[in-house]
Structures are given as C-alpha cells and as structure tokens.
Amino acid sequence: MLKNKFIFSHFIYPGPGKPQDIRQIDGQYEAFTVVEKTTKQNLTQLLASETSTVITESLLAGAIAMALCYIVRLQRTKPPGAKLNCRILVVTGSDCSASQYMNYMNVFFTAQKKNIVIDVCALDQHLSLLQQGCDITGGIYLKVPQLQGLLQYLLWVFLPEPPIREKLVLPPPVKVDYRAACFCHRELIDIGYVCSVCLSIFCKFSPICTTCHTVFKMPAPLAVKPKKKKIKL
C-alpha cells in the first residue's frame, strides 16, 4: 500500500520494522489484525506530519514504480525455481496527469517485462493513461459506477487471479484510448509530430526538439503544378 506525499511516495504497509506479535481480536485472523493496525498507525503518522498546504498533481507513477521495486526485491529473496505471482492494484480518485506520460509508460512496460499485472479501479473519473497500462500488462480497468458497491467490485473483479478471471463473468472491456500526450502542452492528442531522434511527441511543428535539442529542416513548400490550358476548338 502506497500513498503519495507531494514529491515523495511512502509505504503505508509493511512498516520499516518487523511486525509485532498481535493476539486475535474479535475472532479476526492475526495476519489481518497486523495489516490493519500497521496501516492505521502509518497513515495517522503521515497525515499528522503533513503541515504544508501546497497542492500538487498526483504522483501515482512514482508509487507504481516503488511497488515494482518492492516486488523485484521480494522475488530476489525467493529460493531458485520458486515463482512469485504478483499483481498491482491501483485504487485512485485523482486524475492521471499527462505531464507524467513518460513515467507511466516506463512503469507499464517494466511491469509487462516482469509479467506483473496492473489493475486499476477508478473512483471518480475516466483515466485513459491507466487504461493503457491495464491493456499493456493484461490487467483489468474498471470505472466504478457506484461507490456504494466498491467492496463488491473489489471482491468480484479484482480479488481473483488472472488465470481464474477467464472463467468468471466480468464487466466487458471498454475500448482503450491510446492517444499520446504531447511534450509541449501535456495534453492528449490524436495527430501530432514525432521527433525522429528521441521520439518526443508535439502537437505543433517546432524546428527544434525541446527534449533532445535536435534541429530539423523546415518543410519545403509543395510544388504547384501549372494548370494545363484548355484548347478551344
């Protein structure tokens, strides 16, 4: 579990130290009790230590990158031959900023290379960039129609593992919006210009690439063929 804090991402669970031995409370499984208590403590400390009123965009791409690093670290601790089935579930009510387009693409293709599925549960609005990540990694993207049924959607759609999902009747997939974000205005575009050196995308032609500073030649005007004169008979 991760939470963004302006320019940093912090782990809410697991904690930095070893989990303490907790006895069973009200018939709850001990492992669930440890997760609940650790999450509440770390979240309370995070909110209590926050004193700034600066509002910035969500750094969800950084949180996903931290989750990937944590998964890779766990995989290295496994004995040879052991396989760790890992997934990342993103539950968000914020917008995915187009200014982090490259960061999102980096984590999406890294997860695809590591065979890590990314699922997204959008609570507030449609998130096209995260939808692309689900399609790239083979995950499920769902815009929750009613917040009252959030728990049911989490248990029904996101809890089953990918091999089991093929046998379930899940919400039909929606059409993926694969529009890219331009590097000049950070907006999704349908048609644009691509730098042939660094593959940066721009919505308008620029003689100099603002990313790699490559100088391009101005396109020459199209030659106009003279119109043939009609011969009168």
Image (spheres, grey):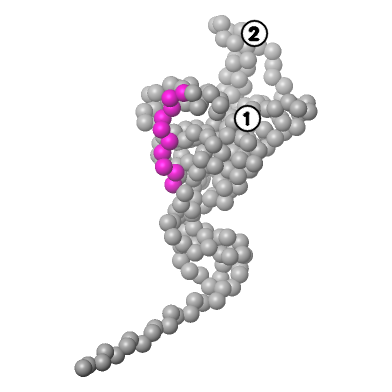
Q: Which mark is residue 86?
A: 1
Q: Viewer-nearest of labels 1 and 2?
A: 1
Three-letter residue code for mark 1:
Cys
Q: Which mark is residue 215?
A: none
Three-letter residue code for mark 2:
Arg
Q: Is residue 8 above or below residue 201?
A: above
Does the stretch in magenta take in 176? yes
Q: Which mark is residue 23?
A: 2
Measured Cα–Cα span from mark 1 to mark 2: 28 Å
Q: Are marks 1 and 2 in contact (CB under 8 Å)?
A: no
Q: Pick whichever of labels 1 and 2 is earlier in the sequence.
A: 2
In the displayed structure image, the side of residue 17 where residue 60 appears, left or right: left
Q: Is residue 154 above or below residue 110?
A: above
Q: Quadrant of the C terminus?
A: bottom left
Q: Dot 2: few (<14), some (14–19), or many (≥20) neighbours within 10 Å?
A: few
Q: Residue at x 26, y 89 (%)?
A: 230
Secondary structure category for the residue under label 1? loop
In the image shown, does 113 or 75 lie closer to the viewer? Answer: 113
Q: Residue at x 49, y 54 (%)?
A: 181
Q: Visible in this render: residue 50?
A: no
For the stretch drawn in magenta, the main secondary structure is: loop
Picture coordinates of residue 195 (x, y %)?
56, 64
Q: Visible in this render: residue 84?
A: yes
In the displayed structure image, the side of residue 190 where residue 25 appears, left or right: right
Q: Residue at x 52, y 60 (%)?
A: 201
Q: Dot 1: few (<14), some (14–19), or many (≥20) neighbours within 10 Å?
A: some
Q: Residue at x 44, y 44 (%)?
A: 176
| Residue range of the region highlighted in magenta in the rendering | 168-177
Picture coordinates of residue 78 (x, y %)?
75, 27
Does the stretch in magenta take in 203? no
